[in-house]
Image (cartoon, helix red, strand yellow):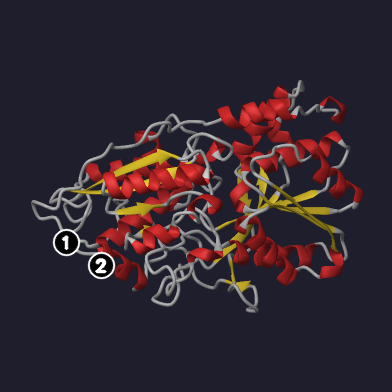
Amino acid sequence: MRTSRIRLMAGGIVLVLGAAACGGSSSGGGGGGSSNSGGASAPGVTSTTVTIGSTQPLTGPAAPGYSEIAPAANAYFQYINAAGGINGRKIIYKYVDDAYDPSKTVTQTKKLILQDKVFGIFNALGTPTHEQVIDFLNQSKVPDLFVASGCQCWDDPSGHPYTFGWQTDYVVEGKILGDYIKKHFPGKKIAYFYQDDDFGKDGVKGLDMEIPAGQVVTKQSYQVTNPNIAAQVQKIAASKADVVVSFTIPAFTALLKLNSLKVGFNPQLVVSNVGSDPLTLSGLLETYAKQGGATVKGNELIQGIITDAYLSTPGDPSNSWIQLFKKIHDQYDAKAPFDGNVLYGMAVAYTFAQALQAAGQNPTRDGIVAAVEKGIAQGPGTVPFRFSSSSHAGFEGAQIGTIKGTVIQLSGKPMTTDDGSGAVQEFTGTQPTAPSNGIPTG
């Protein structure tokens, strides 16, 4: 493919961003379950059900790829429910669209709590969106479990005792990526491209802890509401960076790649886990290029991108967790691609099932918070969680991988670190095997 064929039109990209919601356009399971009668122990709990809610970008700029997450989580809950649920209660998951728009997140979250009376909020997606409701949820003493974002801000047990992260936080991820870059690209020119909010800024904070400042030639940010990033890419190209490391949602990873090709710039890309799912990127590249009047083979453009993961990947079909989630996908979510987003949704749903089981026969809002603080087993992660009474952070590390074909192939050992000056070091433990029936036990 010749770079001269890439002609991006900002207006066209806006249309694509608004229309690219792929899959999962309605809530799973509906409402209900808010009665406190019949053996109930908390809002959203009945003798036979637990109803949880979530805000998700089913449309809007974060929809490509991310709109697959909640349906995948719901698929896992359907699998559990078919086996009788957790402690005799089936999980009803009501997820609603906020279009990655903070104002809509506020409206939808308040409706879930005040009108639908859900037991808790589960895996609500987005740093700039969820930051707008974290105070409300904690003031209302509503469990805010396993936010779909790696913002360091979720780890605040004293200020926000009901909120917990889940995925590796962006500072830790930045340190692990930065450590890899420092060791494998010594003396090379490094550029940053990041989302201008706590998602991107946390990533940059971690990168700066590991990458020597003298190697960093430029730092460029973007606003998620503005897909025209030509000026930022021109500055990165002018810096003659050998490596561009990005903390970007998938749409902007694709835009970064296409804008770079447009100006004849082809550096090594290192991309946060958030924006590196191969199938999502391939589809976006082809869609955006077509909107601009070009034809590309998206999969060819992403080969060799360096990224990281805290879960096993679909590229390892011998892994017991991949086998489990593929079976559930084929039965309950077969219309979606079996990609990293689907894997994420099922894995975080498994963690919720662990927490609900640990909360006991009569779960309460405070009880499930206490259960998570006592610690949650590693489950499908390649590294353990950090959950305790003094830490509401999720996975403690990640493993470097490279896009090869249509999957991320992991290499080396998982790495762990902290959010401060602690070293990046190999994790010496192992990933547990998935339970034979796919349902967590005590």
Q: How many marks?
A: 2
Question: Is 14 located above or below residue 411 in the figure?
Answer: above
Q: Are marks 2 and 1 in contact (CB under 8 Å)?
A: yes
Please report the residue visible at 46 percent of the width from the left and 60 percent of the height from the top. 166
Q: Earlier in the sequence, mark 2 or mark 1?
A: 1
Quarter of the figure that contains the N terminus = top right
Quarter of the figure that contains the C terminus = bottom left
Name the residue nearer the viewer: 414 or 87: 87
**Whether residue 148 can be seen here:** yes
Question: According to the image, label 2 marks what residue?
Answer: 367
Q: Is residue 198 left or right of residue 40?
A: right
Residue type, label 1: Asn
- In the picture, the disc for residue 362 is 1
Q: Is residue 415 left or right of residue 382?
A: right
Residue type, label 2: Gly
Residue 82 position by quadrant: top left
Q: Which secondary structure, mark 2?
A: helix
